[in-house]
Amino acid sequence: MDFVSMLPRMSEPAVTIAGTGSYVPEKVLTNAELEKRIETSDEWITTRTGIKERRIAADDEFTSHMATKAAQRALAQAGLVAEDVELIIVATITPDTLTPATACYVQDNIGARRAIAFDISAACSGFLYAMEIARKLISGGTVKNAVIIGAEKLSAFVNWNDRGTCILFGDGAGAAVLRKSEPGEGRILAMDLGTDGGLTHLLNIPGGGSAKPITKENADEHLATLAMLGKEVFKHAVNHMKAAAESVITQAGLQSSDIACVIPHQANLRIIDAIADRLTVPNEKVFVNLHKYGNTSAAAVAIALDEAHRGGAFQRGENIVLVVFGAGLTWAAAAIEW
Ligand code: UT7
């Protein structure tokens, strides 16, 4: 099913992104180090994916810790104190605990006592799903502002003996502060979200949930690790990301040439190149950081947004497009006037 919506409507105030922040763990795991552990090569990983290294969280560094640091940086940039935050959404598939939500730990860590806090699970699309939920709650008047966070400790859910998946993923967090747009400020122009639950089998963590709890008997089967049919996922990723990006560009009344920066999900450089081609956006306008971090699922587009913003990839008043794809299958895009 596809859900398409557009702001601003006359009755719905526009929502702006007032600040961004990100955090990645210190430890770097390079392709060269992976060559020593499994049968792979820097050459294979680089040519098939574009990834050169990824960050790995320390044993005592949880998803909530990374989310907290990213949120604090976004709040500082937005000039919003934690006491005034009204909503926290963490998008993650690697929560600290199944319950309570990782967002509750973040609320406590940053001291946002007035905020309601919950997690959403939409895999790599989670940050933009969170953006749409927060946008609606702000424009509808339920809350004045929101901190949305994409945060993952994927290293805890990877089978380090499976060369088909372990080379792809990394850890990190990215955040954004949303609030009503004041005159002269930018705004989220359009969003497009989609899901195809008929393809859950293409990318999942099969065990560790109520369907297949981890037991003494199945403990060696790596059921609580990421499993993916890569080639199939690749095909769907290109098609859905292209369609979602085109949808928000059209809804916002823009042309490809009006876009200052496209920030795609960071899973594979070949997917990113294919989308740039199909959208007829020149490569220099497409933000890429997956060579440094690999695929950090819900965190990827959030970290990329923060790095692109702080690095000057786009300026106030310019239009950007975010576009993501992940397990579910899920996908989403946003057109934003900055
Ligand atoms: O974040 C959610 C969205 N995720 C994605 O969008 C990921 C989409 N999929 C992909 O990015 C790609 O499918 C992968 C990067 C995961 C894999 O690339 P591929 O070109 O589809 O390779 P493949 O899985 O078909 O494997 C090709 C060959 C196989 O060998 P044979 O059967 O041809 O002899 C694999 O066994 O490469 C082999 N291979 C490796 N070789 C060296 C698989 N992994 C490795 C490895 N090092 N790490």
Image: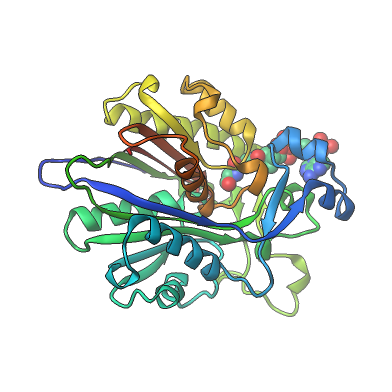
Q: Dividing the image into 4 quarters, which one contains the C terminus?
A: top left
Q: Quadrant of ligand 1?
A: top right
- The mark total stands at 0
Question: Does 336 appear above or below 246?
Answer: below
Task: Give whichever of 104, 242 is nearer the camera.
Answer: 104
**Is residue 95 in view from this perspective?**
no
Q: Position of residue 301 (x, y in %)?
A: 50, 46
Residue at horizontal 51 percent and vertical 45 percent from the top: 307
Q: Position of residue 201 (x, y in %)?
A: 59, 51
Horizontal arrangement in the rendering, residue 268 relative to residue 217 (left or right): left
Question: Does 162 appear above or below 86?
Answer: above
Q: Dividing the image into 4 quarters, which one contains the N terminus?
A: top left
Q: Position of residue 82 (x, y in %)?
A: 34, 70
Q: How is the image coloured?
A: rainbow
Q: Position of residue 292 (x, y in %)?
A: 66, 45
**Is residue 285 in view from this perspective?**
yes
Horizontal arrangement in the rendering, residue 205 relative to residue 164 (left or right): left
Residue at horizontal 75 percent and vertical 36 percent from the top: 46
Residue at horizontal 50 percent and vertical 40 percent from the top: 311
Residue at horizontal 54 percent and vertical 70 percent from the top: 65
